[in-house]
Image (tube, helix red, strand yellow):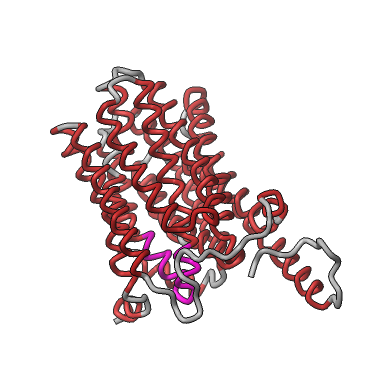
Amino acid sequence: MRSHRFAASLPRETYAFLVARLFNAMGSAFIWPLTTIYVHNVLHGNYATAGWVLFGQSLAGAVGQFAGGAAYHRLGPTRLIVGSLVLTALAQWSLMFARSFPPYAAAIAANSFLISATQPALNAFVGNRWKSVSLRLFNTMYVMNNIGIAIGTALAGVIASVSFLLTFFLNGLLTLCFAAFMWRFLRKLGPEAEDPAVDAMPQVNVSVRQLLRNYRVYALLSAGTLAVNVALAAWNSGVAPYLNQTGHKPDAYSVLWTINGILILVGQPITAWLKRRVAQSLTAQLIASSMLYAVAFAGMSMAYREYAALVAGMVVATFGEMLIAPTVPEMVTRMTGPQAAFYLGLVGAIGNVGSLVGPVLFGHLFDLAGISPILWVATGSCAAGAAAFAGHARLARQGSGARESSRRAPHPAAGENRPFSK
């Protein structure tokens, strides 16, 4: 009954969009799980080379998020989303012709840049178009995305066993289909009574420098996501090599992510309960997420020799993931309104720095001292993330006080810095 009420609360026009997102996520998952294997087995590079490919992919993704957010108001959602998706499909098809390391690394980086450029635009569009249900919709998008990833990663190995080229072709085909869908969807989506047309973007008379000066919106929020992303690298750069080193079969690691995917689907009622009873505000949800991650890594650091402890850690960490994933875009779009795309791109880009730093840091730590210091550093990083999120809430309250003062001032000075939030 609850699920029926939840579904009924979402506009009908979002259903096709959510299904299309599922298929797009499924297609994207054809490539990224196989990058290391492809570089090693097909291009005959070593694992260090594969690591640098992944580093370049993450770096390009961070730059793409910032570029997409900055270009949103110049291009509008239709041209930016559809154009970048079409170019992404071409980049994915170009992988079929990349038979050596440099062209492959360039094509993978281009794919990451372009697909990342669409994310702030999609999130800003969703957050501003369906304001009344945006948090539910962000959460549903997150769940559908994970369903697509689960299906895609399961199919990726099967398809790759037939042909790697087939995975690249199907990935590009599904991306192109998503681009065609978004073009038709955005063109047919009429404005709501109080909303402008989809591509009638509000005029933004502030420069990037002025937007960056509004540090209360993004500084500590970005720092918190960066800290959490550093910690999350412990799975790939700590847990995975530890299991391999201790003689576990490869499926021991994949089982952890199977548990993650299942929990994301069946654990939504528990997450909803946590939001109602424990973490009612968006800030509280971010802090609770960081603390759940910290508990997960701390527990594993004390009992990592038992595989059951790693399973328990993944269970706790998954609930942390479910709290943070839809909350960040919702918080940013609420605070920044018409400028949401820029700040979503900025927060995403800074947060992704953690995905660059984490694997390098933990790779060296694992070579020097094994998994134990990695898990303790991850625990501390999550605690630092919680502190950053708490500081973000304090800055936001200060910003609200400043806005109230400016509203009471009878004659604001010319050129005074205006707040960009709602």
Q: Considering depth in this image, is 184 or 285 the residue closer to the camera?
A: 184
Numbered disc total: 0
Residue 202 x/y as whole percent: 57, 65
Placement of 168 over or under 220, stated as above or below? above
Residue reaching furthest to the left: 162
In magenta stretch: residue 318: no
Over which residues does the magenta segment extend? 125-142
Q: Considering depth in this image, is 237 or 216 the residue closer to the camera?
A: 216
Q: In which quarter of the image is the C terminus?
A: bottom right
By secondary structure, the bulk of the magenta-drawn segment is best described as helix
Residue found 39% across the figure and 68% down from its top: 270
Q: Considering depth in this image, is 22 or 283 the residue closer to the camera?
A: 22
Placement of 352 over or under 122, stated as above or below? above
Residue found 68% across the figure and 57% down from its top: 206
In magenta stretch: residue 135: yes
Residue 173 x/y as whole percent: 23, 45
Residue found 30% across the figure and 32% down from its top: 94
Q: Considering depth in this image, is 393 or 236 the residue closer to the camera?
A: 393
| Quadrant of residue 306 within the rendered picture | top left
Q: Can residue 174 be seen in this view?
A: yes
Residue 46 x/y as whole percent: 35, 18
Q: Along the horizontal axis of the image, is 273 left or right of 340?
A: left
Residue 56 x/y as whole percent: 46, 31
Q: Is residue 230 visible?
A: no
Q: In which quarter of the image is the N terminus?
A: bottom left
Residue found 40% across the figure and 45% down from its top: 115
